[in-house]
Image (spheres, rainbow, N blue to C red):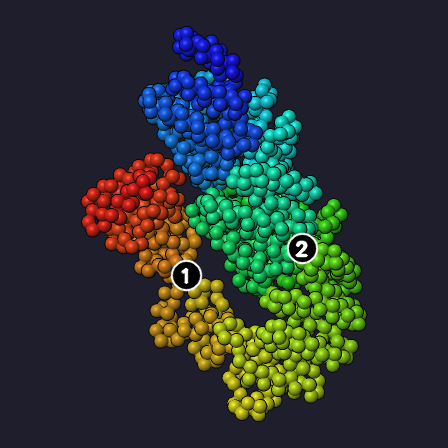
Amino acid sequence: MAALVAHIERRAVDGGRGAADPYVLRGLARHAARAGAPGIGMLRGLVERGGADTAPFLAQALHHFSARLGAEGDLDGALGAAQEALSLWEELERLSPGTHRAAVAGALRTVADRCAATGDRSGAVAPAREAVRIQQALVRSGADAALPDLASSLVALGHRVAGLGDHREALAYAQEAVGAFREFVARSPKAFRPGLAGALGNLAVHLGEVGQLRDAVPPAEEAVDIYRELAAQHPDEFLSELASAVLGLANCSSHLGAHTDALAHTEEAVRIQRGVAEHHPTVPRPGLAVSLHHLSVERAHAGDREGALASAQEAVGIYRTLAARHPAAFRPGLAGALGSLSDRLAEAGDRQGALAPAQECARLHAKLAVEDPEAFRADLALSLDTLANRTADAGDRATALAFAREAVRVQRELAAHHQAVSLPRLAGFLHNLASHLAAAGESAAALPHIEEAVGVYRQLVSQDPVPFRSEFATALNTLSTHRAYVGDVSGALDAAQEALVIHRDLAAWQPNVFRPDLATTLNNLGNHFNSIGDPEAGLRAAEEAVALYRELAAQNPAAYRPALAVALGSLAQNLADVGRPEKALPPAQEGARLLREIVVGQGEAFLPDLARSLHGLGRHLGLNHDDEGAVSTAKEAVVAYRTLALENPTAFENALISALTDLTQALVRIDDRASAVREFDEAVEAFASAHAPTARRLGVERSVFLLGCPGPRASTGVQALISFLDEDPAPDGGADVATVRARRALRAHGDAEAVRTMWEEETFTSAPAWLALSPETLDLVGSWMFAPNWPQSRDVWSRNADALSSEEAATALDELAYLDPRTAQLHAALRRAVLAHGVTAAYDPLILTEQLAEWVECADWAESRAFLQEHPRLLTTEPPQSTPLAHVAVLDVARTEGLDAAYRLVEDRDALQAYVERALAAEDSNALLHAAAVEGEVFDDKLSSLTHAQAGMVLAGAVDDVEPEDLATLVPRAPEVIRARLLREILALSSRHVHPHGETWLRIVQALSGAA
């Protein structure tokens, strides 16, 4: 290197730089980069001695040196070298304008790449944009030679904006770059095919990210084909790119549900990356880590849990090494790998071990989301969802529920702006939230969430069945369970049968992936057939489920023995229901034995399953006339449920009462009522200080038990229930099932006159009206109160107006208020309104509000328009504050300009811009606010939305709520064409409206121009 520098300096003395050997000049920069810091130092000395004339050599060397440092893992050093090169080129351009613009653009692109590599995603966008701007200017000036560099810079800019979460803008750049490279390849294939392959790979990624999953496959396949040819000719240069392209194709296959193909592609990518790593053992291996992460997921889909876990562990190990050296660059990859490791550990049956990586994953994503919300909020939501599952597996259901709620909240916000990308994940999170609510004992609250999830999946499947059929079927299966929880047995069966059809198709297509889901659906379906009175069909489904689970448990005991045990319990129940109690006993005993072993070996996360199994086994022992065995097993079930209910009363209180009831009935069968009363007494005592509401319910159950005993115990039970109802105040504000239970027991008692007499003697008051309430009136008022919607509620009233107007109906409403206070109070007010003003006047506001909510939930704008045409009275309503602002805008414009004009705003971006221009010309603040809502919520144009919202507020005089500095954070992420248009708009508007808010206008202009 020293000899090369000396040669140049000697020739410069003799005849200038041009006298030097051209070979030396061409190779000087690369030789300096290979020599490392000493070589760069020698070139710096040459520049100091030779002046600006030799600076290009140093700039070029710094470019090559930056690439070398990046490949070796010195990311900060690589950035520093790239920035120094950029400074040199900018100075040369300043000294000789117009001669080094292409070099400046290239250096800007390199700086952008190096910034991104260090984890500075926001800092990478501005230089990438500037590189594209310079190269576009060069092309416009006639410099065709700049076209290939422009195409490469468009690919790079797509990378950078995608890193900030804007995949739609990235897609536009990728499409433009692919078009350009195709033209170049037609002229010179050898020179430009690598660029085309890279652009195609990026196009496939961005298409997938915006939800165009099928469209992503052809460019991914084409990229792989090109890289295969290139790698065959130049393996050292293109093997890594081939691995990345193959992995991209694997992701496309996986998104479409073709997991067998995805696994093969991912295994190939890992093989290639391992080969590259073996040839360069000292070079960091992020490509291998990414490929292993995806291999773990695909192996899990294929049922290879052991292999999946090994891949996940290796990926985490590599990412830890990388993140220790470069935290900003590799923390996101480490977080994702930890989330995958948590899933793999859980699938392998290590629920306790799965918690720690899930917690670390969530902590990392929380920090990343604080630093860059746009880029990492989706990852945060996913990690919260994973953490919810792991926390629940560890037994902390209350905390799990909080995590699941937060995951849904974050994902809902994301889906409002990125529907195609975020809706599938929102559906999954809603599904998960429903499961956690049910596990926490909130079955009624769970149902709307799983109904919403199924609705979203149905919409997605109608658009493209393959990618979402599995999730749709699983959600249907869960929906069936939750419908059964709330008593909708026929609805539960419908959902389970629909799920079964899909899961059978999927299991036939990919058995290793979908047989577990098929087994789960069959087990569920067996239970639902039982509930509707078709135990023979239930038995067939249960037998098939157990057979499948036996096969799965033989292959992977840790993962599938718990499910097998649960399925055995369901099979036992089906056998009992078809009149074969003696056949039911062996599977019930086997299931309980398995779960006892699992609880001993894997901790109390499976205690709820064991408790249910013991509860069922106790019943089967009783059916087989083994009353002593039934008592013993029922006691064990009660102990398990008592432990669970002491930790989580809401989730397990009902199950404890049911198990305790079964135990006392078994004790009655062996004529030991005294022990039955003691069991109640012990339970009440256990909860007296731990959870008073549960103790209160158990006390009522004790009295109800006495009510059914012969002799004086029955009178003691009546007296105790009357005393409870007279003296024990109901809880404030909430449902009171203890009071409902006590009242029903007294109404159902065989000697109604004795109950009335004792009430009057004990309370010194007349017997209450509810004591004589007929079951028919209660059922009628309940059907009115719990009608599915307001039109059906109105129809129930119209058919039964006399009965619902009666005083007995008012008493029934008071009674039902103990079950659902809010709904009862609402219907009591509605009843008064109907009696005072008539059915139409009372129901119309409720029906219109309900229809407005349905309109907002329409799947797309075409459906929205059709709904509004069918319900024109909605145009007369004032929407509540919770209504999305874009929908408020559509209603307002539809009132004044008609439906066609209103829906053009949400369907046609050009029409919306024309509306904006009219609003600006008219200085119409309300119209600008409407436009802002549509820009943000429909077209995801955040900068236009916030700019027009702030302009509208200034025009309206609401300047206290205007924060122009908020625009500054959006400007770097927006395309230049949008920023320039907004700047023109605001300058024109502010020049006409300077007073009295000139300072606010100036701050908005400064923010848009980047001077804030």
Q: Is residue 348 left or right of residue 82?
A: right
Look at the numbered disc 1 and give the secondary structure of its residue: helix
Q: Is residue 992 left or right of residue 765?
A: left
Q: Is residue 272 above or below residue 520?
A: above
Give the residue type at disc 2.
Answer: Asn
Residue depicted at 65% across the width and 42% down the height: 313
- Nearer to the camera, 110 or 156: 110
Crowd tier of the residue under label 1, counting other residues whose Cα lies within 10 Å: few below 14, some 14–19, many 20 or above: some
Q: Is residue 396 left or right of residue 849?
A: right
**Residue 499 in picture, x, y percent from top left:** 60, 51
Give the residue type at disc 1.
Answer: Glu
Q: Quadrant of the C terminus?
A: top left
Residue tagged 2: 523
Mark 2 or mark 1, which is nearer the start of the sequence? 2
Q: Is residue 633 above or below residue 973?
A: below
Residue tagged 1: 850
The label shown at residue 323 is none
- Nearer to the camera, 231 or 814: 231
- Nearer to the camera, 173 or 886: 173
Residue depicted at 60% across the width and 36% down the height: 289
Residue depicted at 50% across the width and 36% down the height: 118
The residues bearing labels 1 and 2 have C-alpha atoms spaced at a distance of 37 Å
The answer to whether residue 914 shows anywhere in this view is no
Question: Image quarter for residue 247?
Answer: top right
The answer to whether residue 989 shows anywhere in this view is yes
